[in-house]
């Protein structure tokens, strides 16, 4: 049976690129609303296929996963040189590396991550303490730095305070990924682009801190709660069916997870004041829970598991604001049929997670910010429609770690402060980590 190509918009390739770069969330929602659940579109160098249904996502991510490889374009600035979990294709190597990473994310490890995330909220509180009542703070910068410090502690066992080194590298990576969609990118990739040069310089102190963490973990026999310490133990003791050949491979695996995890907490926390200000009953319940659990003392790691409503707010933020509008592209290695349509070999298939997370036929009142849905069940009557962290076999392993960072950040702010949006200052979309195009100001006030 011959299958037709998916429907596609009439825009030219450059017009399509401009629309997507301007606001990717609106772009993919428009494709779904106007053209359906499987849509084809072209950028200057590549044909894409956008899938916006749970059934289509399962077909692409699970049923036909062996024919759809995760696409990692070769970019001018590539800080991960060796093979890591995010780049390993489905098969025996992926299975063994997955088991290694999973071994560093056991409940005991997650408890350690919660303690580290809670400890890093002290710096978040110190920054807010310095802001005068009624003055503004750049929420994007505030939560970027907190997220970086918490994740660096959990994953690297060091490197806190190096956000100024990491964020330029993340920005360079994002710019290169978007530039890779241009037909002439192979030419501009060879040029000394300013953001690449800045990132190469800035990343050096982070490399030094990471290698120092690896040395410390090795010299102490792998002691420590960080993921790097787990990788060292696995390599030194042969406790996993995988070992790293050198410290560079350990660094690359840690960086791949760290930079992949950064956007989830940053975006969720920076968006949280908008939802809490618009839903005062949610904010009041969140504050009451935090006060009941922590009182006047500093937040502790054990508290994070005792804040179910705060975690529900976290999950609702992740539903509204996934790290990106779509999951990482998958390249069709042969002609395929997806959703009843013909998808030619070489097409990049993207699952539009933002659309699926907000479909009214999957979610009850999806436009409402309602954390209670996560207390009632798994949040979604449809079951598999929460795709912020993808599906197996590539389901994100760091869900609990990301949630710990978000819950810790929400709780620390709720202990003493309220952050309210500045009227008329809605955040703009952009290429910076977290998805914001500039500062996101909030008015700081003490909690009543």
Image (spheres, grey):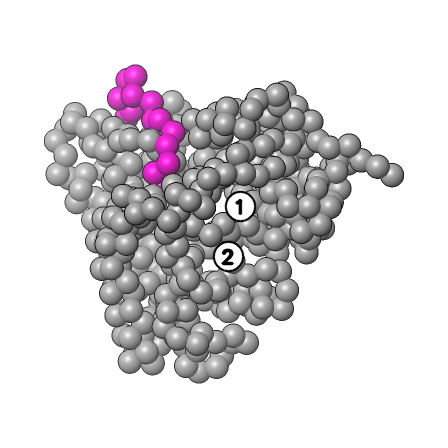
Left or right for 137, reference 369 = left
On screen, residue 402 above or below 16: below
Q: Residue at x 12, y 38 (%)?
A: 130
Residue 344 visible in image: yes
Q: How many labels sit on residues?
A: 2
Instruction: Kindly identify which residue carries mark 2.
Output: 86
Left or right for 143, reference 83 = left
- Give percent across and percent down for residue 51: 64, 36
Callouts 2 and 1 close, C-beta under 8 Å: yes
On screen, residue 231 above or below 405: below
Decide whether the magenta segment is chiefly helix, strand or loop.
loop
Q: How packed is label 2: few (under 14 Cα within 10 Å), some, or many (20 or more)?
A: some
Which numbered disc covers residue 273?
Answer: none
- Give percent across and percent down for residue 340: 77, 36
Instruction: Kindly identify which residue carries mark 1.
Output: 328
349 and 417: which one is in front?
349
**Earlier along the polypeptide chain: callout 2 or callout 1?**
2
Q: Magenta stretch?
A: 419-434
Please identify the quadrant where the N terminus is shown.
top right
Q: CA distance from mark 2 to mark 1?
A: 10 Å
Q: Residue 402 magenta-drawn? A: no
15 and 370: which one is in front?
15
């Amino acid at each position: 049976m011959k299958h037709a190509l998916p429907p596609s918009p009439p825009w030219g390739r450059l017009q399509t690129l401009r629309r997507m770069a301007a606001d990717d969330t609106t772009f993919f929602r428009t494709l779904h609303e106007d053209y359906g659940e499987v849509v084809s579109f072209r950028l200057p160098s590549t044909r894409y296929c956008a899938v916006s249904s749970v059934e289509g996502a399962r077909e692409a991510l699970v049923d036909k996963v062996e024919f759809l490889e995760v696409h990692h374009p070769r970019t001018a600035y590539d800080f991960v040189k060796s093979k890591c979990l995010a780049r390993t294709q489905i098969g025996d190597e992926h299975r063994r590396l997955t088991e290694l990473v999973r071994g560093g994310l056991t409940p005991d490890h997650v408890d350690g991550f919660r303690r580290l995330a809670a400890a890093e909220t002290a710096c978040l509180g110190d920054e807010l303490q310095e802001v005068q009542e009624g003055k503004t703070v750049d929420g994007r910068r505030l939560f970027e730095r907190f997220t970086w410090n918490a994740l660096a502690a959990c994953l690297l066992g060091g490197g806190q305070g190096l956000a100024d080194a990491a964020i330029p590298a993340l920005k360079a990576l994002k710019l290169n990924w978007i530039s890779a969609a241009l037909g002439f990118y192979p030419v501009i990739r060879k040029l000394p682009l300013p953001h690449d040069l800045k990132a190469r310089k800035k990343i050096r102190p982070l490399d030094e801190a990471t290698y120092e963490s690896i040395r410390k973990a090795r010299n102490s026999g792998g002691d420590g709660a960080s993921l790097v310490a787990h990788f060292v133990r696995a390599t030194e003791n042969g406790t996993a069916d995988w070992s790293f050949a050198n410290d560079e491979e350990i660094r690359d695996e840690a960086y791949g997870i760290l930079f992949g995890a950064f956007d989830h907490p940053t975006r969720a926390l920076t968006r949280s004041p908008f939802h809490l200000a618009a839903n005062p009953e949610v904010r009041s319940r969140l504050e009451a829970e935090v006060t009941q659990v922590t009182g006047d003392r500093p937040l502790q790691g054990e508290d994070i598991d005792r804040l179910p409503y705060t975690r529900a707010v976290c999950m609702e933020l992740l539903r509204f604001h996934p790290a990106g509008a779509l999951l990482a592209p998958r390249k069709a290695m042969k002609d395929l049929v997806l959703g009843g349509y013909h998808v030619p070999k070489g097409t990049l298939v993207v699952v539009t997670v933002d659309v699926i997370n907000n479909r009214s036929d999957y979610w009850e009142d999806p436009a409402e910010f309602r954390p209670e849905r996560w207390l009632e069940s798994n949040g979604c009557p449809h079951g598999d429609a929460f795709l912020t962290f993808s599906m197996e076999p590539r389901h994100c392993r760091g869900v609990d770690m990301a949630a710990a960072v978000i819950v810790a950040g929400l709780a620390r702010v709720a202990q003493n402060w309220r952050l309210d949006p500045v009227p008329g200052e809605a955040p703009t979309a952009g290429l910076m980590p977290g998805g914001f195009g500039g500062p996101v100001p909030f008015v700081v006030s003490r909690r009543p």
